[in-house]
Amino acid sequence: MKKIKLKSEEEIKRIREAGQILSKIFKIISKIQMEGLTTLYIDSFIEDLIHKSNAEPSFQTVKDYNHASCISINNEVVHGIPSINKTIHQGDIVKIDIGIVKNSYFADACYTFPIEPISPIARRLINVAKESLKKAIEVSKPGNRIGDIGAIIQKYVEKNGFSVVKDFTGHGVGFAVHESPSIPHFGVNGKGPLLEEGMVLAIEPMVNEGKYNIKILDDGWTTITTDGKLSAQFEHTIAITKDGPIILTK
């Protein structure tokens, strides 16, 4: 594993500036009527908001990716490529994942938006995914281990009858889009690297209605559940401090 780069208080403050822009963008998105819009239209809207905030879309620093966001609908788990051919409909659940860079500091966040009215199972899935992230953040404090993050997510998700995607992980963030360490959203308490003051992490559990198995489509990005069932995701960028975790994208 590559060395984990710890951040100073000043560097965390800079990452938080990027995180606060993300928070404002998600607030704006939550108020727009998405039904009938294409995912490409939403992505262009997001890119415009990022530029107006004097920041840049960090996903465009990733090789061969040209968009400001990933927008994944229903059984698409992650990395849905915005498209003019993909329209949002009533009853959909829409995951919007955005990364930005401001003054060379990076932050990531993702929310799942219900396009009302949604089914009871979709609502429960969204609530469990959101709560699993909250529980993961609560245990992200110095002295605990990365395994504690995955263990609490997995236990809570499986107790509620859902599954955790195992092929993708959370990650360090701040100086780049992806840094060490990797943060699986399943695991064993007391295992993995020690959590230390100064770590900045993107925790992003992906929770499936059915089995955890996934498949990447021919576009090389869009990832779907193999059983066609729904998937929900939430992500925050957090800093680990001596006083506990701080959400930088809240």
Image (cartoon, grey):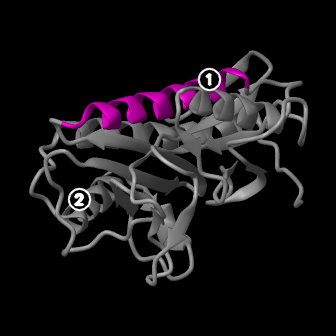
Considering depth in this image, is 179 or 90 the residue closer to the camera?
90
Task: Specify whether residue 13 is painted magenta.
Answer: no
Residue visible at 23% across and 59% down? 42
Q: Which residue type does callout 2 highlight?
A: Ile
Considering depth in this image, is 230 or 100 the residue closer to the camera?
230
Q: Which residues are magenta?
A: 118-139
| Dot 2 or dot 1, earlier in sequence | 2
Query: Does 223 sit above or below residue 111?
Result: below
Q: Position of residue 6 (x, y in %)?
A: 82, 43
Can you tell which quarter of the image residue 84 is in?
Answer: bottom left
Q: Which mark is residue 42?
A: 2
Label 1, on which residue?
135
Q: Please report contact status of discs 2 and 1: CB closer than 8 Å, yes or no.
A: no
Q: Which residue type does callout 1 highlight?
A: Lys
Q: Residues within 10 Å of mark 2 (few under 14, many from 20)?
A: many
Residue visible at 66% across and 20% down? 138
Residue visible at 73% across and 27% down? 140
Q: Single out the residue that lies furthest toward the top.
A: 243
Q: Quadrant of the N terminus?
A: bottom right
Considering depth in this image, is 16 or 235 the residue closer to the camera?
235
Residue visible at 79% across and 55% down? 180
